[in-house]
Amino acid sequence: MIRKRRSSMERRKELAGFLFVSPWLFGFLLLMAYPFFQSLWFSFNKLSLNQDGFSLSWVGLANYHNIFFVNAWYVRNLTNAVMNMVLNVPLIIFFSLFTAVLLSQKFRGRAFARAIIFLPVVLASGVIAKLDSGNFLASLMGAASEDMEGNYSATGLTSFELVPVFLRMGLDVDLVLYLSSAVDRIYQIITQSGVQILIFLAGLQSISPSLYEAAKMEGATGYEAFWKITFPMISPLIITNTVYTIIDSFYNNSVTSMIQDTAFVQLNFGVSAAMAWVYFAVISIILLVSVGLISRRVFYYD
Amino acid sequence: MNSELKTNQDQAHSVPIVQPVVEWYNRYNPVEKAKHWLWVIVRTVLIAGICFIILYPIITKASIALRSSIDLFDPTVVWIPRNWTFDNIKLIAGHLKYPTAVTNTFLLSIGTSVLQLISCALAGYGFARLKFRGSGLLFGIVVFTIVVPPQTIMVPTYLHYRFFDVFGIYGLITGEKGINLLNSFWPFFIQSAFAMGLKNGLYIYIFRQFFRGMPKEIEEAAYVDGSGIFQTFIRVILPNTIPAIATVMLFSFIWQWNDNYFVSMFAPNHTLLARTLDLLPGIARPEYVGGAAHTSLYLNTGILLAIFPIFVLYLFAQKYFVESVERTGLVG
């Protein structure tokens, strides 16, 4: 009797589960899966709009040939986007971990500092960034206030006086240039790492304080405690944040605007679909490779 | 007793200076203190620097927007305008159709975020607690949808709403080729109601994590009392989901507010903030407004106006933001 009721409850739960998920499932099939394969189909066709809808004519691989061998900009923009991503992701991860560690400590004005550091999450927007690029007056103000502010300009710190010093010290040229360019892009890096800081902070908060107490009893310094406790405990979140940062950096860049322009300005829908598919394939490969590389070194507590 | 005292005196006699130094050292621990204060100073400088870099552009924009055009060419004016004015703000608010644009953007954002909240909470609960055959696979697909850039399905999505027709039913009845839903809010609402809007996979993930972390006893008690599954969800589960609801609501509202991609595809001619802002560089071109300095003045004012409503919202809701991820249990 009890068993029968239980199983009927289980069945009702399964049915309810399907019903709860069904709006998403319907949306997925209609608005995601179908367009997803339709887009693949379009990329092998020439699509032309006319009075009653659109018509397709099969062109085979011509669209792909077009973007790789005819279009002068697609491959260049794509390489650029990938290079930017590869350069920025380590910096963003490092910066957000560092800031999260700073913000997880107790000090006066912490709530205020946190509120300011998450401000870019809220205010960052595609249009604003577009309007703000090369802000003429702000850069004038930066130039005028240079004596007071050091080498500060509209977008952040500019040239880095320590570069020749480091180079003369015999450090690797590429490394020095990479780090100094990171300083040049500090504003970009800070504004892109808001959500990552949030995730790292939550992770830091969830590490049990007893681990640190035990380490302190054994005589570990703060530095050792960071590398032996904090870093391994937080390493699964490094994957989460890397994936988030990669997706975020591919959400809005020169390639996406090119895909949009090809479709809606030049009305070359087939070529645009081919571009979008190549873009998707590149992102997937990058995500798979980076997750595969990082997950080998990740430490799971349980 | 006596001998002990004597040895102590002996020691004190043999090292007369070291003893107080050691005592002093043990009591005040100067090296540790110096390290602590050095770290406090370094930390303060770093945090202040990061805050400065974030606030600097906003302060710059406020300073630029509030100055009159005389101050633009006055080299002695750097930060604090000599002639304060609201004229720029009034002018640009007119060009942006500010009241209408803000109202429309607000309605759109509120509408989509409420719909997304409903559909994502339902899906998240289904995936977390009401497991059925294949639900693990479907959740894998949810994670996959986070990864697919919206540009991949852009062309079919556009055509889909241009000739909107579910399974050809409309076409069968009227014989026409679907309804044109572009330039309305319908595409936003449709995709939000079916959890396919902006970053909805992420919201489903947040809700699922949150529901998984809730104790099962709550629901079981409700079931024993004879409450149905849906009723339990509404009456018992949702009131305990406020942190996750607040997080998803805030993020979906703000990401919709800042969105330019869907807005320019679905509703390019609507008076929405993202659209009117996009048109601003065309209106404020140097040859129309008298030079690059004026263009920059107007663009800065426009950006300031665009971020102002969100900034005010953030002032009130920042606490929920900062605590959002911690409280939703997204991590661990």
Image: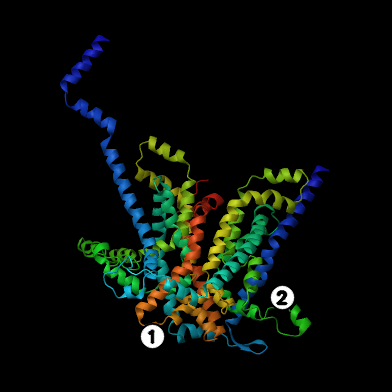
Residue marked by disc 2? B166
Residue B141: horizontal and vertical position, in percent?
A: 61, 64
Image coloring type: rainbow
Q: Nearer the viewer, residue A142 or B3?
A: A142
Q: Residue at x 44, y 40 (%)?
A: A211
Secondary structure under the numbered disc 2 in the rendered image = loop
Q: Which mark is residue B65?
A: none
Q: Earlier in the sequence, mark 1 or mark 2?
A: 2
Residue B242: horizontal and vertical position, in percent?
A: 61, 51
Q: Nearer the viewer, residue A211 or A60?
A: A211
Q: Nearer the viewer, residue A225 or B52?
A: B52
Q: Hey, which residue is sitting farthest bottom in the picture?
A: A51
Left/right placement of residue A104 relative to residue B325 reads left
Q: Type of residue at label 1?
A: Glu
Residue A228: horizontal and vertical position, in percent?
A: 40, 45
Q: Which mark is residue B287?
A: 1
Q: Residue at x 35, y 45 (%)?
A: A223
Labels 1 and 2 positioned on one and the same chain? yes
Left/right placement of residue B114 relative to residue B64 reads right
How far apart marks 1 and 2 lie (CA) works out to 49 Å
Secondary structure under the numbered disc 1 in the rendered image = helix
Q: Hey, which residue is sitting farthest top in the picture?
A: B2
Dot 2: chain letter? B
Residue B150 visible in the current orientation? no
**Between marks 1 and 2 in the image, the one whose residue lies nearer the viewer:** 1
Residue B201: horizontal and vertical position, in percent?
A: 59, 63
